[in-house]
Amino acid sequence: FQVRPVRVNLSARQATAQLVVGNPTDRVLLIQAQVWLWSQEATQDRLEPATDLIVNPPIFELAPGAQQVLRVGLRQSLPPGREQSWRLWLSQVPTPATPGDGGVQMLLRVSLPVFGVGDGAPDPAPRWLRADAGASVALANDGGRHVHVRELRLQSDGLPAQALGPCYALPGGGCRWSLPREWQGRPLRLEADSDAGRLKARFDGPASP
């Protein structure tokens, strides 16, 4: 199935949003929506069941070629001065096989980010780090809104440029990218395209343990 847009933004002034889910296949699809509260501990994502976001309809059937409007909204006002994050799962539910269909059903799940920005939420504050004794690089976010890195580009003398990504760094959390072996412990130049602008960093010496 197809979904657009692929990210939902909510605020105190816009408490609802719409998604359009389409079925380009030649068979009936059954789709279920689930909402998870999304947080990060360091660079590790955590998902917990959420009840403060409503999705309507929570389960629906799509005929071949049909579309369904999905409404996403806040159950209560956003707290001021902070951003909240959720993950919206749209999962294909198994349906009875059609006559003569002896194959295996491949079920799709799409995970969409949902952000709710309260009034006065501080801007993101990205900060680059080397981690794991030079085996990885990390982007910590000390601000009040998320940073979405679309692509991270690496440069180092004597090596061809390398592209990594994408990643989300939530407030108080961050992203981590493992480096290819030949890049580990070397001087690095980093440049990332993000929704917070272009982010750059330079690590001139070998990484500390």
Image (cartoon, rainbow, N blue to C red):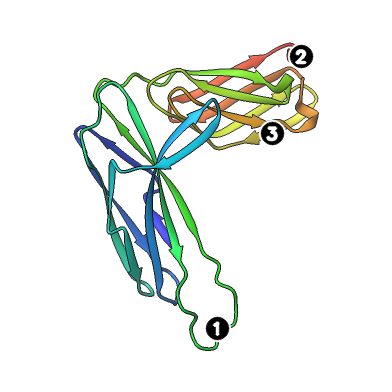
Along the horizontal axis of the image, is 35 left or right of 75?
right
Q: Nearer the viewer, mark 2 or mark 1?
A: 1
**Amino acid at pointer 2:** Pro
Residue 206, label in figure: 2
Residue found at x 73% / y 15%: 207
Where does residue 106 sit, x and y in percent of width and height? Answer: 55, 67
**Amino acid at pointer 1:** Asp
Where does residue 144 sit, x and y in percent of width and height? Answer: 38, 21
Q: Kindly state the secondary structure of the residue where label 3 is placed.
A: strand
Q: Kindly state the secondary structure of the residue where label 1 is placed.
A: loop
Residue sitting nearer the eye, 202 or 101: 101
Specify few, some or many for label 2: CA neighbours under 10 Å numbering under 14, 14-19, or 20 or more. some
Residue sitting nearer the eye, 34 or 188: 34
Q: Nearer the viewer, mark 1 or mark 3?
A: 1
Which circle's residue, 1 or 3, is located before the other in the chain?
1
Residue found at x 52% / y 64%: 107
Residue 101, label in figure: 1
Q: Is residue 139 above or below residue 168?
A: above
Specify few, some or many for label 3: CA neighbours under 10 Å numbering under 14, 14-19, or 20 or more. some
Q: Residue furthest bottom?
A: 100
Residue found at x 64% / y 35%: 163
Residue sitting nearer the eye, 57 or 180: 57
